[in-house]
Structures are given as C-alpha cells and as structure tokens.
Amino acid sequence: MKSCILTISELFSSGKASAVELTKGYIESITAKNQEINAFISVMSEYALRCATELDKKRQRGEHTGPLAGVPFAVKDNICLAGIRTTCASRMLESFIPPYTATAVSRLTELGAIPLGKTNMDEFAMGSASDTSVFGAVRNPLDTSRTAGGSSGGSAAAVSADMCCFALGSDTGGSARQPSSFCGLTAMKPTYGSVSRYGLIAFASSLEQICPMTSGVYDNALVFDAICGHDPHDATTLNRNSHSVPGTSDISKTKIVFPREALSMLSDSVSQATCDAANTLQMLGASIIDAPLPNIDAALAAYYVISSAEASSNLARYDGIRYGYASKSAKSTDELFVRTRTEGFGDEVKKRLLLGTLCLSREGRDAYYKKSLSVKKYLLEYFDKIFATCDAILLPVVPNTARQLGQKDITSLEAWREDAFCVLANLTGLPSLSVPFGKDSNGLPIGIQLMGKALSEETLYQIGIALEETRCYND
Amino acid sequence: MNRELTDIDIKAIAKLAKIDLGTEQAERIKNELAQFMEFAQILSDFEIDGLSSDNTHGDVFRKDTESKDTYSSDNLISPSRISNGYISVPLTVEENRE
C-alpha cells in the first residue's frame, strides 16, 4: 500500500522529522521544479513555515497535533484561503484576496496539514488541459512536452512531481479525475453534497465538488474522510458519516458493470487497459456484468448546456464594481461592465458564457436547457437500474492519454467530447473514483474510473485498493 | 428543435452577456458554438418530462403550499429603519407593525 500521508505523519509523530524540516523539503522541491512544470501560481513558503513552527511547538509541549500533522498539501487556486491571493487563473481575479477560508481547507489545517501553495488551473476551471490559465500552461511532470490535463492540472502535476503530499482539486465535469489520469494519480469525485463548496469559487454549482487528489487510493480515502460532512455554510451538504477508509480489500462479493461497447470509443492502449482492469477485478473475485452504455452524446450535450448556463449566471457577478478586475478606461457604468468583462475574461470563458446566455434565452430555454434537465433525469433512472443490483460501474476516464501541449489538430468540440465518460458522475451527483491502471506505448499512465451509487465511496475505495494491490500499473 | 439556434446572432448574445467581441473573435466563437449546437440537436430526442414553466419551481425546488395571502402587501415587511446609526431589522410582521 502506497501512503505518502502515513509515511510523513509517522516521521513527524515519531520525532524523526520536524514539521519545519518536512515543509522545507517540499518547498525546496517546488523551488527546483516549478519553473518548468508551472504547477503553482502562489507558493506560501512563509505561511507554511509559520504553520509548521506552531505544529513543532505544539508537539514539544506534548499537545495533540492531529492525524494529518506535518503533511504538506496544495490547494487549487479556485479554493479560498483567507488572506492568500486566489485567482482562478484569471486576469479577472489576479489580485483578489478572499476574507475567508474554504471549509475543506479549514478541516485539513485543523487536523495539522500544512498548506504549501495555490495551484495552476484552467481559467475559472473551464478547460481540460490547464492551458487557458492567464499564468501559462501546466506541464506534465511525466513528459513535460505534454499537458497535465485540466482543469486541476496544477494540483495533479504538484502531487505527481512530489511538490506536495496531496492536493485539493475541483471536479465539475472530470476536472480532477482527468488530470489525475494523465499524471498517474488517484482522484475521488465525491457524492454531490459530501464536501462543502463553501469557499470554492462557483462555476457550475449543481455539478461541482472539491476532490482529494493523491498518489494512492488509501491516502485519498484519508483526505476524503477529513474534508467530508455537513457544513452550515453550505446548504447542499449532507449529514453523512465520514468513515470511508475500507477495512478490507476483499471484493469477492462485488458486482461490477462493465459496458463493453465503451471500448470502441477508446484508443487502443486505453481500451486494452480498461479490459485488463475488468479481467483483474474478475480474477480478484468480482462478478463482471456487461450492460449497454447510457446515451453519452446526450449526456455530454446536456453537461455543456447546464454547466455553461450556470456559469453565465455565476460569473455575472464579475462586473468591475464589487471585486476583482475593473477596467480603467470606462466612462460610464454600462461601459465599465462590458470593458471589465471583455478585458478580464479569456477566450474559453467568454465562449462558455455566450453558450450559457444562448441556452437561457427564450428560444434556448425549451430547446436546450429544459431538455438537458430531462437528460439528467434519464441518466438518474439508468444508474438507479444499474445500482439496484450492482455495486459499481467500470469506465475509462478519458479515451486517450495526455496530449502534446498546444496540439492544434483538435477542434474545441472534439476536446469537449473527451469529457463524455466523466460528466456522467457530475450530472447524476454520483461518486466516481479514478485510479491509474496501465500505461501506453509512450509510458504515459492510463486511468480507469469506478462509479458507484450515492454515498458508496467506501465501496469504491475498496475496489480501488484491490486494483492497486495487484500492482499492474507503475511497474 | 429550433433550427434557428444554430444560426447564432453572436453580437446580440454577446450584448446580453455584457461582453464585447472583436470581428475575428466573434466569427470564431460563432462557428464553435454553431458546431456545438448542431451536436446538441441530439437533445431533441428527449421529451421535457414533468418540467414546465408553470410547475418547475413548485415541483422541483419546493411545494408552493403557502397561502397567497402571504404575499399580500399588508403582510410584507417594510424597508428597514435606521436608528442610532444601526439598521434595525424587524424580525416579525407584528414587530414591524408596532
């Protein structure tokens, strides 16, 4: 079992290393690698060392320091930390300093984890290559000519390059699972409402969740348990238990659906790895059941309609008056709105805001938005039927491995279509765990995802650990 | 499905979104959106089931069981008063009447 968290917390609690030493080690790693990888937008060296010093003093006084004591982590730059610049990788928020801290981050720091910095991402989490950032593209540490994925590409690259022990990302349509797949990591998109969105800068509120991104499955469960649960600041949070670390990796009684028709939509290497995962699960005792795929083209269309519609509403607040960037050249209030938004938003964000506005127009509302809500209902019914008799569904994360950065021979619709398998979990609010499984001929990691019924994170982690133990990947 | 939506008046949509687009940018985004809208015609296979403008909010978000009297002007709380430099917010309709 790979566990960066257990290794570090053991070093700290046994007194073999101080929190300051551990933190300094990671800051040195960031200093050495970040110029090339571009994973971090802000590195909080002073802040992190201050937290570490406090932790060391606490330990010297014999006080309880928490189960994540001394474990350094990174935070995607759309998740707020009081007093720390939070940019969403956009010119619109390039100097925004939030007055409050996201609940997910507070829960980790209360347990002794040390925030090291804010990670690069696609602007306002809109993208799948972390190349729409105003701070430049993130490079994949496993092959720096390739994308780290997105939108949580900085978080994935930071963990993959050992610049932090784990990271928080966010997932609106695969934004944590896809970069984790490209960088050989594990990510959990939890059941909607499991993790508070308080302090997560909104993109599409009905779809997104904050997600743990880690090098192994066990660590992921530890972080998920730390951040999940009811929060009075977020009315959509669930009052659920937070014990998802599985006691066993025995999956002999597990029933897993594997829609084989998905294989025809994948590159050869991803298709082979997904088949291998199904065979491995069967070898471990799970029953593998074939079933038809839901209509994933309709799901993809519905996802882009709903997420863009919600974005056009959520991002209406950026008008140059309340906070964020304000155009200096405007001569009237109307001109201030238009110039601020024109100068502050990048191309991809503008495109989605226009799509959202179009879908919410009088003509678009019936033809696209309401139809998309019907697709959501259809998907819920499909998964209800699947999970009435089965425990999980095995799918690829994306049809291919990491692309070359700046690849021009792909249209925006083709890029969007790569999200098709991921958006299912966001539209239905169901949990989905992505784990690395196999590599392509270039040695790039391949990810598979396991979707489960609502609140079944523990089962998904159990299956994930069973797969991890076979060590079929990273070898 | 409304075919006209694939022939997008991008300038009008941009005006609604309070964004100014240059000619080249407008043309590029218009083409990309048209491509997506063409793809999204697949949504026409789905019926709008149980969702109409009359019942969307009542059925999906909350049952509208409150009496219409709730919204009578007699029962609405009037704007807050300012006393001693603080805004005084009445907590109940009765308190507001006092």
Image (cartoon, coloured by chain):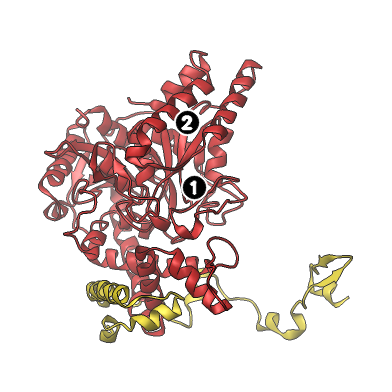
Cα distance, mark 1 to mark 2? 20 Å
Q: Are marks 1 and 2 in contact (CB under 8 Å)?
A: no
- Mark 1 residue crowding within 10 angstroms, few (<14) / some (14–19) / many (20+): many
Q: Amino acid at mark 2?
A: Pro
- What label does residue B66 carry, if any? none
- Mark 2 residue crowding within 10 angstroms, few (<14) / some (14–19) / many (20+): many
Residue B58 visible within the image: no
- Which residue is rendered at x = 42% and y = 57% of the image? A124
Which is nearer the eye, A159 or A26? Answer: A26
| Residue A349 image position (x, y, % from top left) | 38, 64
Q: Colour of chain A?
A: red
Is residue A278 rendered to the left or right of residue B86? left
Q: Which residue is mark 1?
A: A195
Q: Amino acid at mark 1?
A: Val
Which is nearer the eye, A178 or B1? Answer: A178
- What label does residue A72 carry, if any? 2
